[in-house]
Structure formats: structure tokens, C-alpha cells
Image: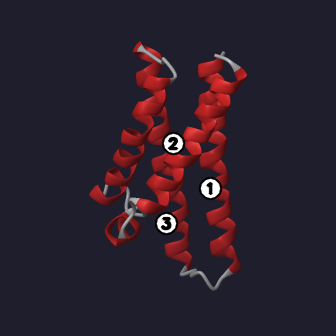
Amino acid sequence: MTDFALLLLLAGFQVKHVLGDYVFQNAYILEHRRIWGHPGGLLHVAIHAALTLPLLVAAGVQGALFLAILLGEAVFHYHVDWVKDGWIYREGWTTQDKQYWWLTGADQMLHQLSYLVIAGVIAA
């Protein structure tokens, strides 16, 4: 993989993340991600997985690695959101609380770091 192709892949993950976490989310998903196993959280992860598929295909990822990345990202993304949303809900934090923003920032950082890991695995 060339350096430019790797940058394109990372840019693709940035676009995918904005689409999955902002454009295609709705109140149903946001309200229920904190409940482990709820269809709202599963829908959120399914959207992310669907958006990841073309990136992996374009990067030429195949076979077991394809499935491992897709499943690994879905499980990781799901649990990062579940922990953050559950914590915020249990504490009763809102957008008016600094802790809400600290957790939201940490959540977004973890998602972005996961894309760096995925790109590194693909490039290796």
C-alpha cells in the first residue's frame, strides 16, 4: 500500500465516521445505545459496518483479515459507545456538564485511534 493510498484510506474512515456517528444517527439509536444488546445500538454498529465494507474492499482486504477487521471494529465501536452512553445516563450528565464533553471527546478519540490501528494492520 502506498503512502497516498494509506492517507486515502484514513480519509475514508473520517468520512465514514461522520456519516455513521452524525448523519445516519437518530433519536432511537441515541436513546438506546446505552442498553446492551438493544436493537438501537446494534443498528448503529450495523451502519458503521456497512460504511466500512467499501473501504476494506477498496483497500484490497480479503478473507479472514476482512472479517476480523469488520467484526473487531463493530465490537469495539459498540462497546465504546455503550460504556460512554451508560456512564453519562447513570450520572445524569447533559451537554451542560463538562464530564459529558470529556466522555464524548474520549469516545471520539478512541474511535479515531481504532481507525489508525485498522490502517496499520492493513498497511503491514
Image-quadrant location for residue 24: bottom left
**In the rendered image, which residue does mark 1 sit on?**
108
Residue 82 can be seen, yes or no? no
**Disc nearer the start of the sequence (1/2):** 2
Residue 86 is left or right of residue 108, and the answer is left
Quarter the C terminus occupies: top right
Q: How far, Cα to Cα, is label 2 from label 3?
A: 15 Å
In what element is the residue under mark 2?
Answer: helix
Q: Is residue 69 above or below residue 15?
A: above
Q: Residue 108: x, y in percent?
A: 62, 56
Quarter the N terminus occupies: top right
Q: How far, Cα to Cα, is label 1 from label 2?
A: 12 Å
In the image, what residue type sits under mark 3?
Gly
Q: How is the image coloured?
A: secondary structure
In what element is the residue under mark 1?
Answer: helix
In the image, what residue type sits under mark 2?
Phe
Residue 57 can be seen, yes or no? yes
For the residue pair 122 and 81, the one nearer the viewer reads as 122
Q: Residue 47: x, y in percent?
A: 36, 48
Image-quadrant location for residue 41: bottom left
- Residue shown at the point (48%, 57%) measured from the top left: 21
**In the rendered image, which residue does mark 2 sit on?**
76
Label 2–label 3 contact, CB within 8 A: no
Residue 57 is left or right of residue 37, and the answer is right
Q: Which mark is residue 86?
A: 3
Residue 50 is left or right of residue 96, and the answer is left
Name the mark nearer the viewer: 3 or 1.
1
